[in-house]
Image: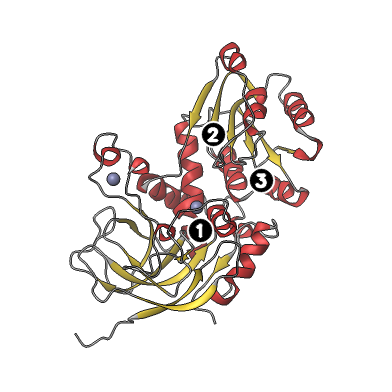
Amino acid sequence: MTISLPTSTRAAVLTAHGEALTLQEIPLPAEIEAGAALVRVACTTLCGTDIEIWHGKMTFPGMLPMVLGHEMVGEIVALGPGTSDALGRSLAVGDRIGWSESTCGQCFGCTVLREPVACSKRGYGFLQRSDVAPYATAGLAEYAYVTPGAAKLLLPEEVKDTWASMAGCAAKTVLRAFQRAGGVRPGSRVVVQGSGALGIFATAVAHLSGAGTVITVGAPAERLAAARRFGADAVVDIADGSEATIARVLELTDGQGADLVLDFAGAPSVGPEAIAMAAQRGTVVVVGSTGPTGQPITLSAIMGKELTLVGSLNGDISDYYRAIEFFRAFAERMPWDELFSEPVGLSQASAKIATMSALGEIKAVIDPRLP
Ligand SMILES: [Zn+2]
Ligand SMILES: [Zn+2]
């Protein structure tokens, strides 16, 4: 046709864990397959996983060089034949879409379990070498190739780029965790462990879901102050250690503990603390514990309190869609924009990973269109 498409893209590439990302020109696929799209990225928000991969705390053997960033939105510049979004809505050049991981639809997890999070071939930008086709599927690039199997959503206008980006991983992960727990009983007591992006968003979700008391447990003080602005009725600083943290939560819950405890922290002590802070017949959701080990938990306490223990892993297209609708429904109810830093270009992505790693900001925002 007459319009010439870009054949390569600028990208911030991770070549070695712990080292600065390098700006490189990497190839784009020459042909756009049926069901795929080429997108000009408008916004990428960094997630804790990006930071962990950068550090090398989370590694995928043989996957370097890679492009980080898996929470992003952009504008379609080209489409393969028959490409639609996950709800079957037809897409056109110029449409604003968000997209997330790809699933195969054919494996045991996809077909028998019917759980996309259990797909054995889940595809992410960080599971794609930037020197192997289709090269650029992640967010820290000016253009990204959205594969046929990727979950794509045509975005409603009311949902800002930053919010929609965050919906792609952090927000959907939180909503799935609440859903896995069976939701929030109106008037009940909820403890959120963690005051990072997930913990603060979870605080808001608990509040907006009708919790009677939301207690956010974390650090440092500025993060806990932010949690208060997102609906925490009380906050507990973990600086004084496990025993003091547990004692304070029990004090705030009339000695009973919380009906629902959600781990968005992942520190080694979250398991035993969650069990100790949970009320009789309470529910504990483990969702932030990506590390290899945690401190031992007391099985007799789980039995004695008749606790329900639930694991929750990331989220799927359903959770992603609901996260978008959540932001749309509650756009005015929380100061969402406080979660996000001022957007910067790809050249500053490395610096942003460093500040996020040092808890200097909650969610860094990269706009690859900026210089
Ligand atoms: Zn699958
Ligand atoms: Zn993520």
Q: Identify the disc placed on residue 329.
A: none
Mark 2–mark 3 contact, CB under 8 Å?
A: no
Q: Position of residue 259 (x, y in %)?
A: 59, 24
Q: Which residue is mark 3?
A: 195
Disc 2 versus disc 1: nearer the observer: 2
In the displayed structure, 319 sits above or below 281; it is below
Q: CA distance from mark 2 to mark 1?
A: 24 Å
Disc 2 versus disc 3: nearer the observer: 2
Is 212 displayed left or right of 98 in the figure? Answer: right
Q: Which residue is mark 1?
A: 163
- At x 23%, y 62%, the residue is 35
Q: In this view, which residue lies farthest toward the bottom?
A: 2
Number of residues whose C-alpha sits closer than 10 Å to that of mark 2, classed few (under 14), some (14–19) or many (20 or more): many
- At x 38%, y 50%, the residue is 321
Q: CA distance from mark 3 to mark 1?
A: 18 Å
Examine the image and state in which quarter residue 315 appears: top left
Mark found first going from the N terminus, 2 or 3: 3
Whether residue 31 is visible = yes
Q: Which residue is mark 2?
A: 286
Q: Secondary structure at mark 2?
A: strand
What's under tag 1, amino acid-wise? Answer: Trp
The front one of 231 and 81 is 81
Is 144 displayed left or right of 298 in the figure? Answer: left
Number of residues whose C-alpha sits closer than 10 Å to that of mark 3, classed few (under 14), some (14–19) or many (20 or more): many
Q: Position of residue 26 (x, y in %)?
A: 40, 76
The front one of 147 and 251 is 147
- Position of the C terminus, as image quadrant, is bottom right
What's under tag 3, amino acid-wise? Answer: Ser
Whether residue 327 is visible = no
Number of residues whose C-alpha sits closer than 10 Å to that of mark 1, classed few (under 14), some (14–19) or many (20 or more): many
